[in-house]
Amino acid sequence: MNRRAFLAAGSAAGVAALAGCGSLESRAIDIPPVLDDRPDAVYVPGHVEGMDMVGMGTVGDYAVALSYSYPHRFWTVTGDERERTSIEDADAVHLMATVWDRKSGMVLPDVGVAVEITQDGSLVAEETIYAMLSQPMGVHHGANFAGLDEGDYEVAVRVGATTSRPTGAFVGRFDEPATATFDFTFDRSEMREIRFDRLDRGGERDALEAMSMENVPTGTAPAADELPGGTVTATAGDVRYVATVLEPPAGVDSVGSYLAVSPRTRYNGYHLSRMGLAVTLDRDGESIAEAELTRTIDPELGYHYGTTVPDGGNGEVSIAVDTPPQVARHEGYETAFFDVPTATLSV
């Protein structure tokens, strides 16, 4: 893979490159302020950055890609509250890890990821990094790191067992931690060459296109016609739901049919993970079942939320968001996916 393979899609977003490079510090000053009038929804941010690849490898059940860019501001989410993480003077780099199933290529959003940076055997930095959502990069884990001077480092990316329920051919997998190790040379002059563009569409109700990342998935959910069963769709706010009812897959020990609900972002179709979803099933005007959905990974259904429902014909399913996605967000997503209206689908 070329080191410049991780570049944000630009022409379709109407971007204009900044003139001159300057120092890393002066480039940070060029970052536009957070938009004052951004909507409570997905929106085009005021700027976009590219990134460089550190490396990619496979270990255990996992494939892992590590990349880096300028330090980023981002927002963490706890319950219904969000908190901004600003760029600190000591921040040197923003590291990003993408973790996926090495066999199917499906991104695994519910793994824990920790990064340890050493130099000549001495610990430089260690941190559990955040599950994140970015318009250009999609589903990944990331954080800013301070304390790095120019030089060569070893970066260990430790991947924990998934907290989502594996079903189908995933049963028995992703239950062991694994560590991928990368050699990383931190060079400020190379970082200054990473693309940084201001956008004249900042604040629009839209999203940047996904990056072109050779051999590295972005966490895009399967299209509705790629899922088994007869799928139905509905949109509520900036969440698009695709639902299907089918026989329970292996790993689901219940009687009845299996309802799988796949929520994804409105524009790029990225998986929305770590949500709390509840459903009510009505038949002939009568409520037959209410359930909290279980976060699940399946090679055919993708990352989804599932439960069993009574057999007995068609009905109306109402989907309510009890907890918004508990993932950190890059700009353009930090105001979205809160107060999502209830969606109704006929299944």
Image (spheres, rainbow, N blue to C red):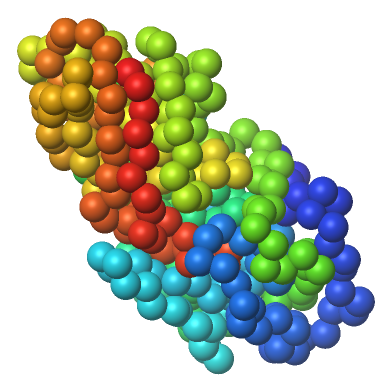
Query: Residue 287 location, x and y as percent?
Result: 13, 28
Up the image or down, 315 lies above or below 19; here it is: above
- Residue 312: x, y in percent? 16, 8
Quadrant showing the C terminus: top left
**What residue do we see at 38% from left, 53% from top?**
340
In the image: residue 184, left or right of residue 305: right
Q: Is residue 52 above or below residue 246?
A: below
Q: Quadrant of the N terminus?
A: top right
Front-most of residues 227 and 314? 314
Q: Is residue 114 left or right of 86 when viewed as pictured? A: left
Residue plotted at (33% across, 56% down): 324
283 or 333, nearer to the observer: 283
Tell me the residue at 44%/79% (across/down). 84
The reply to whether residue 71 is in sight is yes
The image shows residue 112 at horizontal and vertical percentages of 30, 52
Viewer-side residue, 217 vs 135:
135
**With 13 as the anchor, is 243 left or right in this view?**
left
Above or below 229: residue 13: below
Identify which residue is drawn at 38% across, 77% down.
83
Quarter where residue 262 is shown? top left
- Rendering coords of residue 101 (x, y %): 41, 31
Q: Is residue 98 visible?
A: no
Q: Looking at the image, which is closer to me, 291 or 89?
A: 291
Q: Quadrant of residue 63?
A: top left
Furthest residue toward front = 285
Q: Which residue is at the far right?
A: 19
